[in-house]
Image: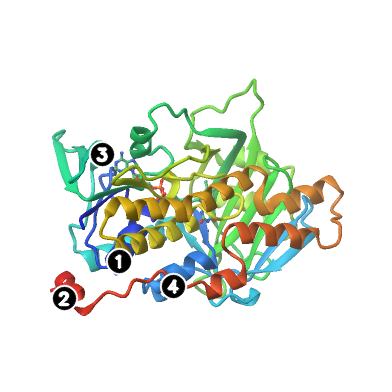
């Protein structure tokens, strides 16, 4: 079965690796002329790390990522509201990883090129439209260098082209723009001494728009050196003062210092964080309404193209990794591509749609918002109840992650030979 993947982000590249592991030789088409290590920090939760481990990537991941051991909710003065262990200390068989998104993407890209061949990811090709028939699906791209059209014929087309997915817009031509909740995020990475024990993710403040998040993504190179710390400050612009510059606007160090000046967190030097960040960018917090269907005949959606969500539970990218593994499993089980895509849709869409909606209600961060409303005090057991409820929804409790049957498809020797020569 020939599979074409549109988009070379975390979702598209993991999809390609998952399909390859299941015996396929997919092609990836990416609009950017070159895949570059852009972005800031991201957390891969144990349910995603398990899938990357089963793709044979745990060693490489461990070499570029840090395993945080603790999630620490704090108030605006830095005092602890609630804490829970993460990854292995919480009982998972897999760690959680904090990693630079760009490094993760380059790791995935290198693995795709090594396993599927140097030409498996074609860059500078902008997906425009598709048409499908009983016999296959034809995708049309624009070569951004030559301006010439490029056509690709396949049995299955996967749209992994992110929140502004063109594949999705062809399936849902009347869908409006993404939804914003009025919150903007200033995101940066800076050299700074390790915060707290150097293995904590700190979420301080409370309600969306009044929150500061920080966690390390790289240890100091020497004992005297600084760690690399990822940070996010949520801000709200008044309705009369729309943010200048639109999404991806660069925030100056002076502006960041002013934004952070009302915070008093004794374990981090916020002035240094603002001044030492190589670049700070502002993005609106966006999602899209859950879809009634992802799969249409031979075409389906995956990752942010299928389910962009507010970043409340560190789950968007992690869920796209699970999508990829389940999609490959479905395609390997069924010679009928359309039936396989219907099965994938049934297995993933209701579960992930529920996370999108839960994140609109703050997801696991309901804990810190409730605490802020009640002067830092939470009724006994409420934080545990919120955390467990969200994990269950995300397929991320310790028993769910540790014991669910593997999505790995046994590839028979003949297929291996066909693939690897
Ligand atoms: C502040 C913040 C923090 C987050 N933290 C976490 C976290 O801790 N953990 C987590 O799991 N998730 C997190 N997320 C979510 C996560 O970043 C996304 O869910 C994930 O990166 C989406 O990956 P993707 O590959 O689906 O989309 P993208 O990364 O957007 O990739 C899409 C790719 O498709 C390409 N493309 C687009 N259009 C076309 C076209 N027409 N033709 C060809 N190619 C095209 C793009 O160039 C891009 O390379 C966070 C998000 C935010 C905003």
**Mark 2 and mark 1: span between their CA atoms?**
19 Å
Q: x and y percent of residue 282 in the render? A: 53, 39
Mark 4 or mark 1, which is nearer to you? 4
**Mark 4 and mark 3: span between their CA atoms?**
34 Å
How packed is label 3: few (under 14 Cα within 10 Å), some, or many (20 or more)?
A: many
Residue 238 or residue 29, whichever sits in front: 29
The relative height of residue 404 versus residue 272 in the rendered view (above or below) is below
Disc 4 secondary structure class = loop
Looking at the rendering, in which quadrant would you find the C terminus?
bottom left
Q: Is residue 36 visible?
A: no
**Mark 4 and mark 1: span between their CA atoms?**
21 Å
Disc ID at residue 406: 4
Q: Is mark 3 within 8 Å of ligand 1?
A: yes
Disc ID at residue 111: 1
How packed is label 2: few (under 14 Cα within 10 Å), some, or many (20 or more)?
A: few
The reply to whether dot 2 and dot 1 touch (C-beta < 8 Å) is no
The reply to whether dot 4 and dot 3 touch (C-beta < 8 Å) is no
The reply to whether dot 2 and dot 3 touch (C-beta < 8 Å) is no
Position of 147 with respect to 381 (left or right) is: left
Which of the marked residues, 1 or 3, is nearer the chain's N terminus?
Answer: 1
Disc 2 secondary structure class = helix
At x 71%, y 53%, the residue is 204
Q: x and y percent of residue 8 in the render? A: 32, 51
Disc ID at residue 126: 3
Residue 337 or residue 131, whichever sits in front: 337
Q: x and y percent of residue 119 in the render? A: 17, 57
Which of the marked residues, 2 or 3, is nearer the chain's N terminus?
Answer: 3
Quadrant of res 83: bottom right
Position of 63 with respect to 20 (left or right) is: right
């Amino acid at each position: 079965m020939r599979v074409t993947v549109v988009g070379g982000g975390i979702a598209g590249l993991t999809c390609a690796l998952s399909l390859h592991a299941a015996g396929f030789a997919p092609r990836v088409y990416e609009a950017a002329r070159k895949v570059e290590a852009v972005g800031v920090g991201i957390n891969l939760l144990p349910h995603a790390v398990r899938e990357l481990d089963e793709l044979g990537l745990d060693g490489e991941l461990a070499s570029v990522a840090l395993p945080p051991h603790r999630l620490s909710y704090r108030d605006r003065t830095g005092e602890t509201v609630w804490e829970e262990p993460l990854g292995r200390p919480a009982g998972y068989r897999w760690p959680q990883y904090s990693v630079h998104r760009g490094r993760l993407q380059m790791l995935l890209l290198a693995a795709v090129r090594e396993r599927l061949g140097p030409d498996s990811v074609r860059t500078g090709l902008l997906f425009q439209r598709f048409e499908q028939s009983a016999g296959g699906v034809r995708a049309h791209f624009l070569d951004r260098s030559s301006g010439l059209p490029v056509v690709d014929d396949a049995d299955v087309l996967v749209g992994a082209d992110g929140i502004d997915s063109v594949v999705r817009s062809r399936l849902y031509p009347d869908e409006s723009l993404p939804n914003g909740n009025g919150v903007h995020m200033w995101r940066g990475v800076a050299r700074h001494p390790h915060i707290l024990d150097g293995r904590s993710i700190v979420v301080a403040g409370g309600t969306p728009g009044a929150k500061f998040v920080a966690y390390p993504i790289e240890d100091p190179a020497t004992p005297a050196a600084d760690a690399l710390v990822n940070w996010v400050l949520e801000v709200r612009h008044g309705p009369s003062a729309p943010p200048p510059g639109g999404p991806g606007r660069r925030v100056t160090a002076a502006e960041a210092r002013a934004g952070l000046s009302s915070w008093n967190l004794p374990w981090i030097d916020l002035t240094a964080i603002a001044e030492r960040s190589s670049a700070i960018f502002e993005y609106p917090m966006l999602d899209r309404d859950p879809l009634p269907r992802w799969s249409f005949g031979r075409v389906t959606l995956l990752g942010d193209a299928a389910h962009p969500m507010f970043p409340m539970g560190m789950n968007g990218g992690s869920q796209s990794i699970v999508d990829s593994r389940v999609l490959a499993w479905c395609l390997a089980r069924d010679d009928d591509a359309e039936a396989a895509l219907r099965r994938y849709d049934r297995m993933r869409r209701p579960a992930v749609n529920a996370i999108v909606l839960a994140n609109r209600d703050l997801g696991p961060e309901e804990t810190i918002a409730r605490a802020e409303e009640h002067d830092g005090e939470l009724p006994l057991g409420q934080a545990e109840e919120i955390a467990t409820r969200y994990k269950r929804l995300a397929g991320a409790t310790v028993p769910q992650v540790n014991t669910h049957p593997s999505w790995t498809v046994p590839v028979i020797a003949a297929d291996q030979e066909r693939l690897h020569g």
